[in-house]
C-alpha cells in the first residue's frame, strides 16, 4: 500500500510517499527555519502562510520523486494533531481536498505517533511492544508502545519540553534558533563537569520530567555573569547543560525500562539527534542487554515519511477520517 503523507504541524512543510509503512519512496521537506530565525522562534502566522505557499510544490515534488501520479497512491495521510493550529489546518485542508478529488481514503495521524514510527522506516525488524523516549520541541514523554496504534504514557514533562529548553538556553547563550543543534555542536569540545546544574525530580512521579528549573539555572548563570562583567565558557556551559539533560532523560527512561521489564527500547523526536543523548542511550542499553533503536538523524526532525509510516498502521487498524476532519492543537498520544 502506497500512502501520500502530508506534515505541516510546525515550521516544516513536508510530503512523502511511503510503501507498506516501511519503505520511503520519496520525502520532500521545505524548511522555514531561515525565515523564523530572525524572530528567534517560530511565528505561527508566518508558518501558516508559508505552508499555504509551499504545500502544493512540495507535494508535487514528492509524487515526482516517487515516480507516481496521484491516482497511483492508495491513500492520503495527514498530521491532524498536535501542533500549531493554523499550520495544521493548512495540511488538513489540503489533504482533504486531495482525498476528495482523487477518491482516496483520508488517514489522520498524530504527530508524536509519527515520530515513533520514524523508527520503522530505519529498522525493518522493529515491532511493538517496546518502550520509547520521545523528546521534541513540544514533547518529552516516556511511552510504552504496546501495539502500532496502542500507546501508554508512562511519564511526561511537567513544564518545558526538552527541545524547548535547549532552544531557550541557546537563545540566552547567543547561539541562535533553532538551538538544539547549535548547543550540541557548541558543547562538543566542552567540559561537561565545569558547571554543576540542578537535576529536578517530580515528587511521587518517578518517570515524569521537569526541565524549567534546569533551564532557569543556566539563564541565571548567564545573567549573573553579564551583570558582574564575567565571561562564561559557552562550550563548557553547552556541554554541562547537554550532559545534564541527557542524564535526566536517560535516568527516568531506564528506570521505567527496568521497572516494566522492557528489553526493546527506542528514541524519537528532534532531540533524538542529540549526540550526548544517543551516546548515553547506547551505554545504558548495552549495560542492560537491551536492543536500542535510534532513528537516523535525517528522520529525527519533522518529516512526512514518518507520517506515512504511522498512517499505514492507522489504516490497518481501521482509522479513516471523514471529510469533516479538523485540526487539533493539543491531544495526548
Ligand atoms: O521533533 P522536532 O523536529 O519538532 C517538534 O515536533 O517539536 O523537534 C525540534 C526540536 C527543537 O527544539 C530542536 O532544538 C531540537 O528538537 N533538536 C535538538 C537537536 N536537534 C534538534 N536538541 C538537542 N540536540 C540536537 N542535536
Ligand atoms: Zn515533531
Image (cartoon, rainbow, N blue to C red):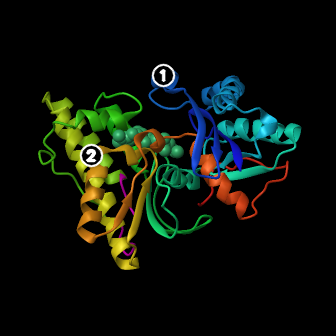
Which residue occupies the foreground of this view, 61 or 189?
61
Which residue occupies the foreground of this view, 123 or 206?
123
Which residue occupies the foreground of this view, 60 or 301?
60
Tell me: is circle 2 under 8 Å from ligand 1: yes
Mark earlier in primary sequence (1, 2): 1
Which quadrant would residue 297 be assigned to in this image? top left
The magenta segment is 202-211
Viewer can see residue 158: no
Label 1 and label 2: CA atoms lie apart by 24 Å
Residue marked by disc 1: 34
Point out the residue furthest to the front here.
67
Against 74, residue 57 (above or below) is: above
Which quadrant would residue 56 be assigned to in this image? top right
Ligand 1, seen in the image, is in the quarter at top left
Q: Determine the residue positioned at 78% across, 35% down.
A: 70
Q: Position of residue 169 (x, y in %)?
A: 32, 39
Asked if residue 299 lies left or right of residue 89, the reply is: left
Q: Which mark is residue 242?
A: 2
Q: Taken as a whole, is the magenta stretch helix, strand or loop?
A: loop
On the rendered image, what quadrant is the C terminus found in?
Answer: bottom right
Q: Position of residue 275 (x, y in %)?
A: 29, 44
Q: Position of residue 119 (x, y in %)?
A: 48, 53
Asked if residue 304 lies left or right of residue 261, the reply is: right
Q: Position of residue 77 (x, y in %)?
A: 71, 46
Magenta includes 266? Answer: no
Amino acid at each position: 500500500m502506497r500512502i501520500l503523507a502530508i506534515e505541516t504541524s510546525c515550521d516544516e512543510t513536508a510530503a512523502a510517499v511511503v510503501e507498506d509503512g516501511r519503505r520511503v519512496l520519496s520525502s520532500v521537506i521545505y524548511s522555514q527555519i531561515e525565515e523564523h530565525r530572525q524572530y528567534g522562534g517560530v511565528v505561527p502566522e508566518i508558518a501558516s502562510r508559508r505552508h499555504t505557499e509551499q504545500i502544493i510544490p512540495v507535494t508535487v515534488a514528492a509524487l515526482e520523486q516517487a515516480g507516481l501520479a496521484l491516482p497511483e497512491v492508495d491513500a492520503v495521510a495527514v498530521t491532524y494533531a498536535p501542533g500549531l493550529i493554523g499550520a495544521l489546518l493548512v495540511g488538513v485542508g489540503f489533504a482533504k481536498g486531495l482525498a476528495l478529488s482523487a477518491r482516496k481514503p483520508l488517514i489522520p495521524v498524530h504527530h508524536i505517533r509519527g515520530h515513533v514510527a520514524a523508527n520503522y522506516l530505519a529498522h525493518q525488524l522493529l515491532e511493538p511492544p517496546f518502550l520509547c523516549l520521545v523528546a521534541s520541541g513540544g514533547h518529552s514523554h516516556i511511552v510504552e508502545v504496546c501495539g502500532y496504534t496502542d500507546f501508554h504514557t508512562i511519564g511526561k514533562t511537567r513544564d518545558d519540553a526538552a527541545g524547548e529548553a535547549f532552544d531557550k538556553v541557546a537563545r540566552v547563550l547567543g547561539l541562535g534558533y533553532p538551538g538544539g543543534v547549535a548547543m550540541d555542536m557548541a558543547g562538543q569540545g566542552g567540559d561537561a563537569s565545569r558547571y554543576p546544574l540542578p537535576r529536578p525530580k517530580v515528587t511521587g512521579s518517578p518517570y515524569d520530567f521537569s526541565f524549567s528549573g534546569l533551564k532557569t539555572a543556566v539563564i541565571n548563570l548567564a545573567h549573573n555573569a553579564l551583570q558582574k562583567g564575567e565571561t562564561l565558557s559557552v562550550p563548557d556551559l553547552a556541554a554541562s547543560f547537554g550532559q545534564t539533560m541527557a542524564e535526566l532523560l536517560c535516568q527516568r527512561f531506564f528506570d521505567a525500562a527496568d521497572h516494566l521489564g522492557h528489553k526493546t527500547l527506542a528514541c524519537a523526536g528532534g532531540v533524538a539527534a542529540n549526540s550526548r543523548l544517543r551516546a548515553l542511550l547506547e551505554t545504558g542499553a548495552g549495560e542492560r542487554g537491551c536492543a536500542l533503536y535510534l532513528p537516523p538523524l535525517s528522520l529525527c526532525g519533522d518529516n512526512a515519511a514518518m507520517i506515512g509510516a504511522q498512517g499505514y498502521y492507522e489504516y490497518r487498524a481501521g482509522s479513516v477520517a471523514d471529510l469533516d476532519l479538523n485540526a487539533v492543537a493539543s491531544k495526548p498520544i
